[in-house]
Amino acid sequence: MNANPIITKERFPVHSGSLSPKYIREVAEDFFSSLSERTCRTYEQGLRDFSKFIGESEIYPALLRFLRLSPIEAYRLALQYQSNLRERGLASGTINTRLTALRALVKFMQVMGLIQWDLKVKNVRTESYRDTSGPTQDVFLRMLKKAKGQRLSAKAKRDIAILMLHRYLGLRRGAVVNLDLEDVDLSAGKIAVLEKGLQEKLIKTLPEGTKAALQIWIEERGDHPGALFHNFHRDITVRKRISGTGVYHIVRTLGEKVGVKTRPHAIRHSSVTDLLELTNGNITGVQQFAGHKDVRTTCIYNDNRKDEAGQLATLLEEWDKTAQK
């Protein structure tokens, strides 16, 4: 009887002696080719982190070491990695994404016949949205004003467009990073956005102010194809697509300039909450705006906006005070 119920069978690698980092890379490239560009980058980031955890500087030698383990050893190492991610204080969503990347690649290696075991380490429990607040309207407008006042006009134009996409389209940081010039149709007032978890881009309507901000930035950027937003490396020849960290830094810095600590996703929180207020709780419309797969996520924002629990707590307290008189 198998001593570990998580691993279905006590099976070992079938080709462990003939495997090489080069061959692992070739097989992994087939795996990555089936993923979207965004998912590919996310999985590679997770696998690089796992590689560092087991003491390797490169992904493929690390994977080779991992695949040569017995199922029990692999499972224990994956659990140790999960514990390490928790100890580092990473969000449950980030932990689960990195575990998913590892599981998915192991499963692909199994399908390809390189190993005969599967990795069944489970995700950690995710917490529901608790704090759905974000920068107030006043704070956002002050951040926008600070962006407009930046000395480097090109950077100002880029940062304004990014801020407005976060606020007025509710885009996640990853969606902003993945935008290409070809995704923007200024004449039609549309933009194609790759939402979280989707394989195909969705067409969204640009509000007039956001469209104008994008037009100003594109005129500055130029009409060459590729990433819509790039960094501002001193050497123009090595400029490349802005990273998620870069977008985070833009928002964080502008927030600090007006005396608040915020982040890109907090602006999205504000947009969703403010729209629920403006529409008197139009759950369906705001769900579509935010791209929430599950309407219950939008309902959490609505519940937090109304704070019915807080109102009931006050009601109960007042009732007890009345009884004491």
Image (tube, rainbow, N blue to C red):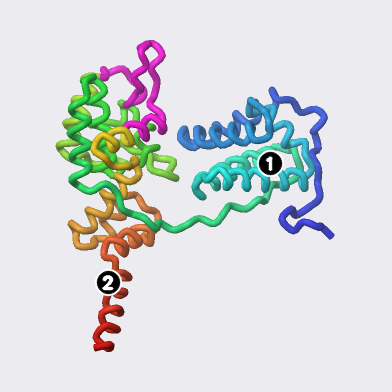
- Residue at the image point whose x is 39% and y is 54% from the top: 293
Q: Residue furthest front?
A: 325
Q: Which callout, 2 or 1, points at the residue further toward the start of the chain? A: 1
Q: CA distance from mark 2 to mark 1?
A: 55 Å
Is 109 or 263 nearer to us in this picture? 263
Report the label total.
2
| Nearer to us in this view, 18 or 79 | 79
The answer to whether residue 75 is left or right of residue 323 is right
Q: Which residue is mark 2?
A: 311
Is residue 24 in view? no
Q: Is residue 52 magenta?
A: no
Left or right relative to 113: residue 159:
left
In the picture, the quarter occupied by the C terminus is: bottom left
Residue 220 drawn at (x, y percent): 23, 19
Percent coordinates x, y for residue 294 in the rendering: 40, 58
Residue matched to label 1: 111
Q: Secondary structure at mark 2?
A: helix
Dot 1: element? helix
Magenta stretch, main secondary structure class: loop
Does residue 284 show up?
yes
Residue 51, image quadrant = top right
Question: Alpha-carbon neighbours of circle 2 within 10 Å: few (<14), some, or many (≥20)?
Answer: few
Q: What residue sits 32% from the left and 31% below the top?
A: 250
Residue 27 percent coordinates (x, y) = 65, 30
Give the residue displayed 51% in from the left and 50% down from the top: 92
Q: Amino acid at mark 2?
A: Gln
The residue stretch that appears in magenta: 221-250
Q: Quadrant of the N terminus?
A: bottom right
